[in-house]
């Protein structure tokens, strides 16, 4: 068996098929053991993978996990603080709303309303219909 380490700077290996068998995903930052022929093929395909001895693997496992920085507005997370601040630019509207002071409804009550039905409208005759109606008569407009 060969222990392969996929460094954090690597990439998740998914849907890798070897001899008709699809391997389970190997996320970045994790260790996995593989048969020698599978490990050789993975190393040829993915140059960022590293071969580790049992002692080196144990050191990696014993190392405390680095603090990851998580976006409070979505599922984005990273190990680099600068990357999080760059990502947070995509949430300008949410950040602006969060900075607005919230008013306690006990101090300033929230307006309430009651649902009403609209008034029934009175049928109106169009002005053009009045002028062409046979009932229209009179002298018309006169100027003095």
Image (cartoon, helix red, strand yellow):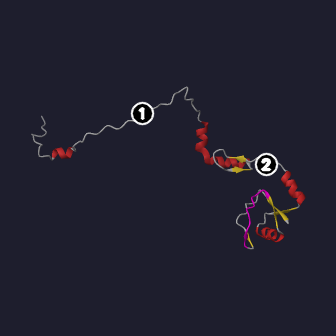
Q: Secondary structure at mark 2?
A: loop
State yes or no: residue 15 in magenta. Answer: no
Position of 62 relative to 105 (above/below): below
For the residue carrying disc 2, how many other residues have a C-alpha within 10 Å: few (<14), some (14-19), or many (20+)?
few
In percent of width and height, residue 34 lies at 81, 66
- The residue drawn where x is 58% and y is 43% is 93
Magenta part of the chain: 20-30
- The residue drawn where x is 84% and y is 54% is 60
Q: Which residue is mark 1?
A: 114
**Residue found at the very far bottom of the displayed protein:** 19
Whichever of labels 1 and 2 marks the residue nearer the N terminus, that label is 2
Q: CA distance from mark 1 to mark 2?
A: 55 Å
Position of 106 relative to 62 (above/below): above
Q: Quadrant of residue 37?
A: bottom right
Comparing labels 1 and 2, the label whose residue is closer to the camera: 1
Between 23 and 93, the one nearer to me in the picture: 23
**In the drawing, what numbered circle is on residue 34?**
none
- The residue drawn where x is 36% and y is 37% is 117
For the residue carrying disc 1, how many other residues have a C-alpha within 10 Å: few (<14), some (14-19), or many (20+)?
few
Q: Which residue is mark 2?
A: 66
> Is residue 129 toward the left or the right of residue 12 in the image?
left
From the image, which quarter does the C terminus lie in?
top left
């Amino acid at each position: 068996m060969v222990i392969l380490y996929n460094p954090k700077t690597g990439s998740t290996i998914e849907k890798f098929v070897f001899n008709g068998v699809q391997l389970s995903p190997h996320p970045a930052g994790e260790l996995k053991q593989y048969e020698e022929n599978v490990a050789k093929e993975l190393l040829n395909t993915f140059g960022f993978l590293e071969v580790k001895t049992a002692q080196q693997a144990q050191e990696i496992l014993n190392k405390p996990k680095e603090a990851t920085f998580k976006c409070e507005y979505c599922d984005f997370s990273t190990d680099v603080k600068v990357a999080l601040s760059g990502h947070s630019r995509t949430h300008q509207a949410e950040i602006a709303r969060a900075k607005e002071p919230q008013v306690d409804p006990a101090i300033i009550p929230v307006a309430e309303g009651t649902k009403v039905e609209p008034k029934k409208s009175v049928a109106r005759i169009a002005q053009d219909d009045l002028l062409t109606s046979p009932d229209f008569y009179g002298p018309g407009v006169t100027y003095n």
